[in-house]
Structure formats: structure tokens, C-alpha cells
Image (tube, grey):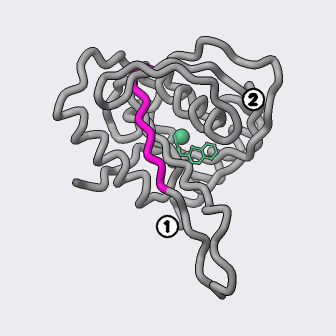
Amino acid sequence: MAILPIIEAPNPFLRTLSKPLDKVTDETRALIANMFETMYAAPGIGLAAIQVGHPIRLLVIDLQEDVAENGEGEGDAPPARIKKPQVFINPEIILASEEVGVYNEGCLSVPEQYADVERPARVRVRWLDERGATHEEELGGLLATCLQHEMDHLEGILFIDHLSRMKRDMLLKKLSKLRKAA
Ligand code: GNR
Ligand code: NI
């Protein structure tokens, strides 16, 4: 396993249209394992293959939500997290709700920049998993937001593209300043 370098804006490679994956091979599964390792290390809740240099329609998500009951009297212990790694291959949105939700999004390819993005609140999605099995489910909440963010990456779209030109340019400018300072 390995932590892979994450490609950052404004690298034009992030604008590549990712290609469908026609076969899940051992090589694909090795990439998936590396993508999870990279995402957990970042840390992030999702990662598209294009962000680590592979323009294929593959993404991973793990919301790692807090355990509801973290035990009482545990003092300053950080909240426990439930790991739920999910792999989406060739995902397709079949139906999107009229209702929208707003989430303050970030992106590992636009580090340390956040902005509110409006997206359909629920989506019906079909995808393949790492064993090649088909799934179809209606998703909502943060999972729906994150999946749509990741699926945008497959089209070469970043969350900043959903903002006004002024806000987008401001975030990109802050990002370049941040880099110069580093
Ligand atoms: O880690 C991430 N957090 C996040 C928060 C709100 C909406 C989307 C995301 S995805 C992001 C990781 C990433 O850049 N995936 O492409
Ligand atoms: Ni992203």
C-alpha cells in the first residue's frame, strides 16, 4: 500500500474526462487500496481516481461518522469513528431530487478552501463495486453530497465551478498565496 500524491488546482489534468472502467482487475483493487490509504491520511471523506492521476470512473468514499454513543465518562477521548469504506465504479445518477441541500464543501485538490455548494438533496444512483456487482440505491445526506462532488471530478468539474466567478477566483487566489507562503 502507498499514499499517492494528490493533484491540486489549477493543474489542468483535473479537467480530464474520466473513462468508464470495463473490467475490475487486481490492478484496480490495488489502486482502490491505495486510494483509501491516501484518503484516510489526508484526511478526507472521498477521493476520485483522477485526483491521484488515473482518469477512470472510480471513486471511494468513507464518511467515518461519529459513533453515536461514545460511552460515558470517557473524558477527553476523541469521538470514535465507524469506518465504512465504499467503492463506486462507473456510477450513474438515475434521478435527482428537486429539493436541494447546501453543504460547506472542501476538496483535497483545492486544499484549505471551503464554500457553500447547493446540490440535489437526494439522488438515485447505480454503480459497480470492487467485485463487479451492480448496486442501485437512493442516497441522501452527506453521502449524496460527497458522491455528487466525487462524480463531478469524473467530468473534470471542481466544487469551485459551482460558485460565482468572483468567489472562485478569490479561492484560487488564496490557494496560490498559501503555496507561496509555504
Ligand atoms: O474530504 C472531503 N470533504 C468533503 C466535504 C464536503 C463535500 C465534499 C467533500 S469531498 C472531500 C475530499 C475530496 O476532495 N474528494 O474529491
Ligand atoms: Ni474533491
**Could you tell me the amino acid type at mark 2?**
Ala
Residue drawn at 65 percent across, 51 percent down: 113
Per the rendered image, the range of residues in magenta is: 83-91
112 magenta-colored = no
Q: Residue at x 77, y 36 (%)?
A: 166
For disc 2, the neighbor class at 10 Å (few under 14, some 14 to 19, many from 20) is many
Please provide percent x and percent y for residue 74. 63, 84
Q: Nearer the viewer, residue 10 or 54?
A: 54
Left or right, 123 with respect to 107, comes to: right
Whether residue 90 is in magenta: the answer is: yes
Q: Which residue is mark 2?
A: 121
Image location (x, y in percent) of residue 26 = 16, 34
When the figure is inspected, residue 82 is found, relative to residue 103, above or below; the finding is below
Q: Nearer the viewer, residue 93 or 175?
A: 93
Q: Secondary structure at mark 2?
A: loop
Q: Main secondary structure of the magenta part?
A: strand
Which quarter is ligand 1 in? Answer: top right
Q: Report if the CB atoms under discs 2 and 1 are less than 8 Å apart.
A: no
User: Eyeballing the image, is 83 above or below 60?
Assistant: below
Q: Residue at x 43, y 51 (%)?
A: 39
x and y percentages locating residue 84 in the rendered image: 48, 48
In the image, residue 134 above or below residue 43: above
Task: Write down the residue under mark 1.
Answer: 182
Q: Would you say the beta carbon of the disc 2 residue lies within 8 angstroms of ligand 1?
A: no
**Given this view, does label 2 or label 1 mark the residue nearer the observer?**
2
Find residue 173 and report its horizontal and vertical position in percent: 64, 48
- Amino acid bearing label 1: Ala
Mark 1: secondary structure: loop
Residue lying at the far top in this picture: please name it: 94
